[in-house]
């Protein structure tokens, strides 16, 4: 999966290709000290600055016409504290490298999202999450942070040190400073058994509360234009390890989920009328399977088919109604949707700007193949999500502004107060932050 590119013209693009920016200059600091100096110089020059990871956000959260900071030299594990059950990692480390390094040390994060291309700071800053009954987002597993603030000083924070900054900065959308290191809670590596199986949508929605309660990690994909879903339950296992066979894995994860799916989307984009038939075939292509492996090999999967995505968190109790309204909207419209709708959950957490802040949440993610017009679908979906007090994922397409978000997040004012203190001149600001946090 390709990361961001910076062409000769100095244009930066995100992974999906729906956001571009033309920064005045780019820097790639090799140390925290170098980054501090760069932040001070940028402030003296009266410019704004943004750190950018792998560009996996669909929003312009990292876009800047000022100074673009690339953290790819700030990578690797700084230290492991086995007694405390923590690991401290440099901010530019990709999740896939962290996961592999932890596994070599016999350790693992408790929960993670389904993509591991992002940097740890990019993933946590936008609230990247997986699915879990008791375990929350990647940011909910943070135990400490180090960040460079607008005046170039290095601030460390945790529950005991600068606790109000710690509370806010775990999901900070890049508004409070540039994160240089993150301390995560980790645990001894364990095994998960994944059970994937097709199931009618009607049954999933009828039994949703039981499926959620009986499984540590439950998620499902509904295929629009059909009554079909693919479900996935991940639960801890005593073993033995039984990974997906190489041939089977290649066939299902690469050939079907990426290769054939990409080809089908190309056909659907060229001839939208074929999409309902393709959806019926796609929804039946993957057969039931069970396998047991270490966490990151179960939670994550390759995503080579490029798309644009919108995702909202609604109260978990509102999931069934919200999804039924989404299905009714698609059924009565002339929309042609070739990508499945992904549904996950998270327990309430205590992070001010977390989509699960203070409430048990369910996530509904809608996608469109890259290059296909998505506005009509996303606008209609967003109307349904916001009617159920939805909170948009900070890194995915949405049209909400500070006025809406202040009403959706009880601790919104707490976050903006920390921002006013740490970045009064909005050195880390951009158009996206002006819209979602206010001027």
Image (tube, helix red, strand yellow):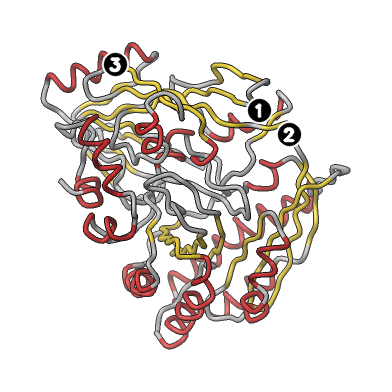
- For the C terminus, the image quarter is top left
Residue at image location 27% in from the left, 40% down from the top:
63
- Mark 2 nearby-residue class (10 Å; few <14, some 14–19, many ≥20): some
Q: Position of residue 223 (x, y in %)?
A: 57, 73
Residue at image location 34% in from the left, 55% down from the top:
409
Residue at image location 74% in from the left, 66% down from the top:
197
Please, what secondary structure does the residue beneath circle 3 have?
Answer: helix
Residue at image location 60% in from the left, 56% down from the top:
258
CB contact under 8 Å: marks 3 and 2: no
- Mark 3 nearby-residue class (10 Å; few <14, some 14–19, many ≥20): many
Q: Which residue is mark 3?
A: 36
Q: Position of residue 345 (x, y in %)?
A: 56, 59
**Cα separation between marks 2 and 1:** 8 Å
CB contact under 8 Å: marks 2 and 1: yes
Q: Nearer the viewer, residue 315 or 324?
A: 315
For residue 102, the mark is: 1
Q: Position of residue 100 (x, y in %)?
A: 65, 30
Rendered view: 416 above or below 373: above
Q: Which residue is mark 2?
A: 189
Residue 381 image-quadrant placement: bottom left
* Relative to 306, 208 lies left or right: right
* Relative to 55, 68 lies left or right: left
Rendered view: 394 above or below 34: below
């Amino acid at each position: 999966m390709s990361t961001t590119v910076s062409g000769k013209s100095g244009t930066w693009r995100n992974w999906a290709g729906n956001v571009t920016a033309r920064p005045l200059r780019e820097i790639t600091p090799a140390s925290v000290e170098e980054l501090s100096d760069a932040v001070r110089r940028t402030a003296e020059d009266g410019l704004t600055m943004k750190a950018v990871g792998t560009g996996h956000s669909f929003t312009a959260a990292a876009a800047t016409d000022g100074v673009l900071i690339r953290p790819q030299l700030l990578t690797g594990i700084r230290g492991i504290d086995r007694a405390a059950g923590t690991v401290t990692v440099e901010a530019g480390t990709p999740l896939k490298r962290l996961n592999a390094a932890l596994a070599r040390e016999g350790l693992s994060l408790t929960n993670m999202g389904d993509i591991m291309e992002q940097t740890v700071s990019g993933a946590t800053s936008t609230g990247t999450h997986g699915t879990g009954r008791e375990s929350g987002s990647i940011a909910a597993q943070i135990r400490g942070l180090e960040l460079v603030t607008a005046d170039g000083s290095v601030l460390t924070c945790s529950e005991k040190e600068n606790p109000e900054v710690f509370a806010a900065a775990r999901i900070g959308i890049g508004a409070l400073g540039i994160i240089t290191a993150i301390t995560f809670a980790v645990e001894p590596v364990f095994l998960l058994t994944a059970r994937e199986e097709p199931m009618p949508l009607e049954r999933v929605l009828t039994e949703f509360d039981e499926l959620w309660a009986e499984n540590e990690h439950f998620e499902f994909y509904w295929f629009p234009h059909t009554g079909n879903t693919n479900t996935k339950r991940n639960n801890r296992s005593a073993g033995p390890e039984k990974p997906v066979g190489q041939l089977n894995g290649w066939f299902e994860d690469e050939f079907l989920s990426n290769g054939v799916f990409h080809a089908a989307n190309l056909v659907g984009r060229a001839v939208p009328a074929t999409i309902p038939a393709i959806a019926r075939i796609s929804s039946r292509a993957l057969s039931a399977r069970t396998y047991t492996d270490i966490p990151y090999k179960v939670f994550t999967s390759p995503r080579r088919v490029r798309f644009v995505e919108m995702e909202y968190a609604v109260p978990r109790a509102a999931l069934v109604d919200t999804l039924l309204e989404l299905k009714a909207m698609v059924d009565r419209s002339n929309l042609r949707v070739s990508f499945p709708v992904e549904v996950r959950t998270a327990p309430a957490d205590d992070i001010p700007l977390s989509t699960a802040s203070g409430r048990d949440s369910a996530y509904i993610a809608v996608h469109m193949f890259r290059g296909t017009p998505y506005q009509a679908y996303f606008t209609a979906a967003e109307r349904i999500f916001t009617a159920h007090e939805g909170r948009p994922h900070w890194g995915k397409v949405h049209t909400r502004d500070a006025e809406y978000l202040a009403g959706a997040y009880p601790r919104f004012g707490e976050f903006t107060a920390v921002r006013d203190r740490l970045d009064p001149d909005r050195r880390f600001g951009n158009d996206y932050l002006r819209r979602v946090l206010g001027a």
